Amino acid sequence: MNSCTYEVAHRERATLSAIPVQQTVARPHMRIAFFTETFIPKVDGIVTTVCQTVKQLKALGHEVLIFAPEGGLTEFEHCRIVGLKSSAFPLYPDLRLALPRASMRKHLMDFKPDVLHVAEPALLGIAGLYYGGGKFGGALHLPLVISYHTDLPAYLHYYHLGFLEPHVWKILRFRHKRAAVNLCTSKKMVDQLRSHRIERVALWPGGVDADLFHPSRRSEVMRARLTEGQPESPLLLYVGRLSAEKDIESLKPMLEAFPQARLALVGDGPHRKALEQHFAGMPVHMAGFLHGEELAGAYASSDIFVMPSRTETLGLVVLEAMCAGLPVVAVRAGGIPEMIEDGVSGYLFDTTAEAIARIGELLESKDRQRFLGEAAREHASRDSWRSATIQLVEQYKLACERQPEAVDEPLTPRSLTLGGRMKKTLKRSTMFAIRRLLP
């Protein structure tokens, strides 16, 4: 596979510190610098996506350099990790935040990447936006790809901050404007970004490890563990972060409708104590994080997977459950409906009453459970991480081809109001601060 081809636009502006490139670069592999705000040892959908993507990029013959908050690792899949000093976020101690450092430039200069990929730029990812993208390819004249994994505007409403949504979209437009390609993991999110005037948006579907998540992983020992010693009871399963935006509280009436059933919550997060109080006295097992074969066993050993979250940009856990042959009852929201054919490979619901009816149908019929589970497995197992990564590489190549274009909107002369002058001053002072931090 050939590397992407791109030219250095406006070469006269590249005299200070741009990575030297030729007009045509043709190598059998690409070098990708990956910036992620969250990485191992944290567990979430972004970490899963980054890890699987890096693994597949390496298997396809590409080189990857990872910038991430420090986590004790210096290498992943033989790819170097540049760990940056980080601090715990007070509202979510498991999340560690890292600021960019001027030393990142030296690492990039040594690595000589073909493209920068920033997953959810917030703090650390600002470096990716500074060193790449924009009209001239950033400070290092490199193509920039940004991937959108979190429906942050929707999250705000769960923390009583919905009034900030218009301002958050302004920030999102500002950062995504710099990218030659903006990636979303579902068509729903592609449409959402476009509706908010974000351009150059493309689909980057998720994947699943069909060998790991398999019905053969069913274990009576795991089932006994998740049911707290009552394996004969119907078992509902949720896997994911325990946080307010996941709507896990809405599972309570679903569980109450079936007195013999039990619920296992696999995962952890800042909302755990609130959920323990919410489900107090009910047959609910807080299993904490499970990984690898244990997680695969949890899926395969349960009866129904329930997904109440309305803020999923994709929902990798839904794909994992389906691949394990587990019938899914999920809310009709976000990217989830793109994975499930209602009534064929799972059930979608809009209301709690509808969810209860669907769960009841499955609990009353083992044959129905088996039918949906088999259809779910057949559907989900087609979405491999290898296929998703091959599509990603094509987007990298497209970003490199686009970079010579002026992706920033042209400036048009106009008189500025007092507010406009203040915004312009703020922008200039912000860029001054970034340049001081990232020379």
Image: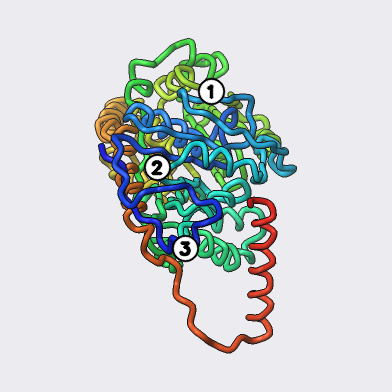
Query: In the rendered structure, which disc, 1 or 3, sits on the residue that comes first in sequence?
Result: 3
Is 58 placed above or below 190 here?
Answer: above
Residue at x 50%, y 45% (from the top left corner): 119
Name the quadrant of the N terminus. top left
Is 124 placed above or below 154 here?
Answer: above
Q: Which is nearer the eye, 26 or 228?
A: 26
Q: Is disc 2 placed on a helix, strand or loop?
A: helix
Residue 282 in percent (x, y) is at 62, 30
**Residue underneath mark 1:** 290
Residue at x 53%, y 25% (from the top left corner): 75
Of all residues, the one furthest to the top in this rendering is: 221
Between the residue at mark 1 and the residue at mark 2, the CA separation in whole angstroms equals 29 Å
Is 258 placed above or below 229 here?
Answer: below
Q: Which is nearer the eye, 56 or 116?
A: 116
Residue 182 in percent (x, y) is at 41, 55
Q: Is disc 3 placed on a helix, strand or loop?
A: helix
Disc sitting over residue 357 in the figure: 2
Looking at the rendered image, the disc whose residue lies closer to the viewer, 1 or 3, is 3
Is residue 228 shown left or right of residue 181? right
Query: In the rendered structure, which disc, 1 or 2, sits on the residue that comes first in sequence?
Result: 1
Residue at x 46%, y 57% (from the top left corner): 137
Check disc 2 and give the amino acid type. Answer: Ala
Is residue 172 shown left or right of residue 372? right
